[in-house]
Amino acid sequence: MAQVDFNIGHKDYTLACQEGEERLLKRAAALLDGEAQQILQQAGRMPEARLLLLAGLMLADRTSALEDRAASAERELARLKTNPQRVEVPVIPDSVSEALAELAARAEALAQKAEDSLTS
């Protein structure tokens, strides 16, 4: 078994974990320590058990909010899958495209003619 050393708040810990899970344990400890550090900045030093409880509750609250958002997104995705909105993209006929290109060319020619007459 692997052992991981980490710090939460103002205390060092060592925990055993399965081989390959060290990174996950360090990440979880870092999240808990981040919450603990915020609590310590706001409230100052406090007993270890209270600090861990408050940090855990803050993480649980954040996790709950994320789970609610994920559930809402999943419901919206399921709704869209079962009732997709039809999107129609208009297709411009080639004849209209050609006519617009011809009009643009004429407009450019007229603009050039007007510009030339102003400069001469």
Image: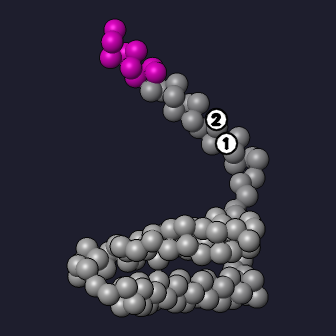
Identify the secondary structure beneath mark 2.
Answer: helix
Query: Residue 79 magenta-drawn?
Result: no
Of the pair 36 and 113, the residue shown nearer to us? 36
Q: Residue at x 32, y 17 (%)?
A: 118
Distance (Cα) linking label 1 and label 2: 5 Å
Residue at image position (69%, 88%) is 79
Name the residue beneath numbered marker 2: 102
Of the pair 97 and 113, the residue shown nearer to us: 97
Marks 1,2: beta carbons within 8 A: yes
Residue that protrudes farthest toward the top in the picture: 120
Whether residue 72 is visible to the viewer of this picture, yes or no, is yes
Q: Please name the residue shown 49% across and 88% down the image.
A: 60
Examine the rendered structure and indicate whether residue 53 appears above or below residue 96: below
Which quadrant holds residue 69? bottom right
Residue 58 visible here: no
Mark 1 residue element: helix
Q: In the image, 6: left or right of 90?
A: left
Q: What stretch of residues is rendered in magenta?
A: 112-120
Residue at the disc numbered 1: 99
* Residue 117 located within the stretch drawn in magenta: yes
Horizontal and vertical percent for residue 104? 57, 36
Q: Is residue 2 left or right of residue 9?
A: right
* Residue 116 quadrant: top left
Residue in front for this viewpoint, 27 or 12 = 12
The amino acid marked with disc number 2 is Glu
Type of amino acid under label 1: Ala
